[in-house]
Amino acid sequence: MNAPTAAFAPEHDSTHPDTTAMATQTTLLNPRFYTTDFDEMDAIDVTPVRADWDKLIAQMKSDPNKGHFKKTADWDQIDWDGMEPGLRAEFIDFLVSSCTAEFSGCVLYKEMKRRGNNPDICELFSYMSRDEARHAGFINDALREAGIAVNLGFLTKAKKYTYFRPKFIYYATYLSEKIGYARYITIFRHLEAHPEHRFHPIFKWFREWCNDEFSHGEAFALLMRTDPRLTSGVNVWWIKFFLTAVYSTMWVRDHARPEFHKALGVDIAWYDQEVFRKTSAIARQIFPIEIDIDHPRWIPTLERLERAFVDMDAARQRGGIGGAVGRIVAGARAGLAFAGLYTIPARRNTPPASVRLEPSY
């Protein structure tokens, strides 16, 4: 388990207080650190999905990406100082956010393994924490080249932790892993066709990388399949909530990075809808519903949500009584927009008998 150990090691001269502060922030849009009821998770019995479970664990144990997260001759040298300032700021924000999200998974999975006694669950989370540590470390190496790496050791102590019940961990983390796959593979395929837009070498590593994300999502799909109640009854409303929250957060966050997406040569609305479409298709393996992203209210309401967050941020920067009032008003608008998204009728699905999928995009 060398990779997780390295990820938890204190950083030294190449860390930067600004990027560490960015990673430490807890807002509606920033990646969070989670904790949960580890005893409940340790009690999971994977007998109902044993055949698929053993195949997935064997695949993870074989560690197909063991040698992938290393710089090779394909790693081009980047002139960080010569990068256009707006792009540089947004790309750093993208890398810090991605590093924090990956490291969040590492911390959660490592803690699950540490506290557990269930051999099936402990083995799964040992492999997943290994993978996420590699991902976070690789991103941090890219930041280190610019002299602005995140102090991951400090982050584990300074970052606030959010408690989620295990079922909420399943929904949120499953979607995080699957949408991560969809995001990475969509960027990879786009740059494969348009290499002139590949402004940083890290994008060359996305194909194998996103396959880790895919297999992690497979694990959570199997965990959910061990208890039919997790995807039926009132929990369908929770599934819809997390689908809406994850999709809308991605929309707002991506639209805050116009220079980053311009450099990639992608229209943000197209990119987000394409990622939503891939994620929705994949999630049919386990969820009985999906968001209707073609509904006439979908994009206009996302745009209202985005404007509310822009105004909320402007009010925060303005400060004072006027800023406080502005934040409240913008927050109320954001809440109404989210409610509008949530009330869009969902499409119904009948998940297959076996949830296992292989990456195909």
Image (spheres, rainbow, N blue to C red):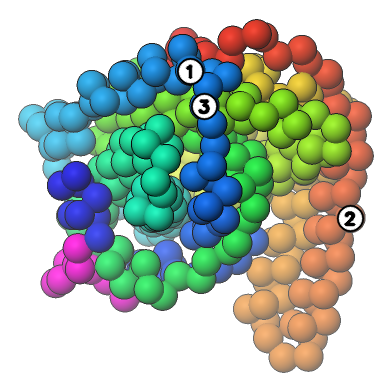
Q: Count residues near mark 3 (Cα–Cα under 10 Å), then give few for <14, some for 14-19, many for 20+.
A: some
Question: What's the residue type where badge 2 is placed?
Answer: Leu
In terms of secondary structure, where does tag 2 sit?
helix
Residue 316 shows in the view: yes
Q: Earlier in the sequence, mark 2 or mark 1?
A: 1
Q: CA distance from mark 3 to mark 1?
A: 6 Å
> Measured from the top left, where is residue 232 in percent x and y?
80, 29
Q: Which mark is residue 46?
A: 3
Question: Quarter of the image holding residue 204?
Answer: top left
Q: Which is more foreground, mark 2 or mark 3? A: 3
Name the quarter where the N terminus is drawn.
top left
Residue 188 shows in the view: no
Asked if disc 2 and disc 1 are in contact, CB closer than 8 Å, the reply is no
**Span colored in magenta:** 9-17
Asked if disc 3 and disc 1 are in contact, CB closer than 8 Å, the reply is yes
Question: Quarter of the image holding residue 293?
Answer: top right
Q: CA distance from mark 2 to mark 1?
A: 43 Å
Specify whether residue 51 is painted magenta.
no
> Measured from the top left, where is residue 347 in percent x and y?
83, 21
Q: CA distance from mark 2 to mark 3?
A: 40 Å
Depth order, front residue of 357/329: 357
Relative placement, left or right, of 334 versus 145 is right
In terms of secondary structure, where does tag 1 sit?
helix
x 65%, y 53%: residue: 165
Q: Can you identify the residue that label 2 sits on?
A: 336
As drawn, the residue found furthest toward the bottom would be 320
